[in-house]
Amino acid sequence: MFESLSDRFQRVFKELRGEGHLTEFHVDQVMKELRVALLEADVHLQVVKDFTTAVREKAVGQEVLTSLSPAQQVLKIVSAELTKILGGKAAELNLRKRPTVILLVGLQGSGKTTTAAKLALHLKSKMGKQVLLVPADVYRPAATEQLRTLAKENGLFAYDPKGEPSALNRVRAALKDAKLFGYDVAIVDTAGRLHIDEALMDEVAKLSELAQPDEILFVADAMTGQDAVRSAEAFAARLPLTGVILTKMDGDARGGAALSIATVVGKPLKFIGVGEKPKEFEPFHPDRAASRLLGMGDVMGLIEKVSAETDEKAALLAAEKLRKNEFTLTDLRDQMRQMKKLGSIRSLIDHLPKIGPLKNLGNVDIPDDATKRLEAMIDSMTPSEREEPKLINGSRKLRIAAGSGTTVPEINQLLKQYQEMKRMLKGASRMRG
């Protein structure tokens, strides 16, 4: 997320830090670089103009130009202005009513159905809400079945329309059930439609009038850039949107839609999809996004992710084994499985700051299947071999390699890394002593 733009920003500020004294000329050069970087990232032209003007006005102030660390002052100003154009502060859902009705709208192919399931899972797992998914897409073949399948796979509830061909009748009956059975939230998945299709836009307006939703969220594909922003504007002209969800943010290296949409449409970006898995969906925090853009990472987001997904008891047990230098290959495998719950290794690295000793982390190439191969090797060992790797001789290595679909050199590399880790932990234990 934001990789290309983040790299450009970091290069600009690296050059600026080399200046002992800052002048208006330096500020103008920085603004020129930032302007080009933002435009190349497909950020809306007016947003770029407003951003660079605001930063320049504040950066040429006396307190900045005479500061002992002017580059840091400019960085602080840029961070504040980026946060502002990204929406200022995290926008929460309006969940005061029961059932809260959330209407998802957007273009065809934007990922509304998948997003409906992701949002429902988020509300259930993070907030303890009972959610009813309502299939109101009567045009796309298998749209209803897709939503019901996603619900079943993730332990969610989906309304069964029993073949009802009218979207209005489906929503009317589903909301009646939501009230009757005490659901906290009803999420209505509408059909994808072009904003120039008057008939379909009239239909979604009627759905909105019928459902009286507490939230109308526009779902857009982040990778379409300014097309997503223009579509959101058109929908906002017909419907009282309350926010935006951007999907496929993990594949959007530029970030133009995210940086433009809140300012241009006047509606907050509330959630982002950051992967294909159901749990790869998170609330959008403008300040954290600005921090990641500037290479300062999102440590708070990483802490929240780790806290939500890891087994605290298992983590404490592993820490105690590490302290006593009793960490086995079985423990190593279990920890890798815990890490997999957090998403890809790349997504974890992206949360870390790219400064100081971590500045080259972005260049590290870690295959997504790296942990799978390590797990396969350890799983192909006997319990005694995992507890005491010294037992693993040449013939055992051949057996393990054959069983895991790897090679003997890979087995040797795993054992070498494990022994090095053991020596390091032993040394750390002596230092504590």
Image (cartoon, rainbow, N blue to C red):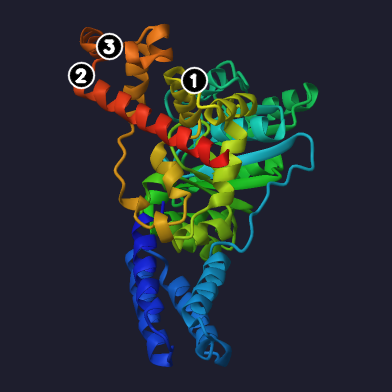
| For residue 86, above or below residue 224 | below
Whether tag 2 and tag 3 are in contact, CB under 8 A, the answer is no
For disc 1, the marked residue is 145
Say whether disc 1 or disc 2 marks the residue closer to the N-terminus: 1
Amino acid type, residue under disc 1 in the picture: Glu
- The residue indicated by pointer 3 is 400
Identify the mark at residue 408; answer none if there is no mark. Answer: 2
Kind of residue indicated by mark 3: Ile
Instruction: Determine the residue positioned at 26% across, 8% down.
Output: 396
Q: Nearer the viewer, residue 100 or 42?
A: 42
**10 Å neighbourhood of mark 3: few (<14), some, or many (≥20)?**
many
- Residue type pointed to by label 2: Val
* SS state under label 2: helix
Residue 183's spot in the image, x, y percent? 74, 27
Q: Earlier in the sequence, mark 2 or mark 3?
A: 3
Q: Distance of mark 2 from mark 3, alpha carbons?
A: 8 Å
Q: Image point 48% across, 60% down: which residue?
A: 296
Q: Which mark is residue 94?
A: none
Mark 1 to mark 3 CA distance (whole Å) = 43 Å
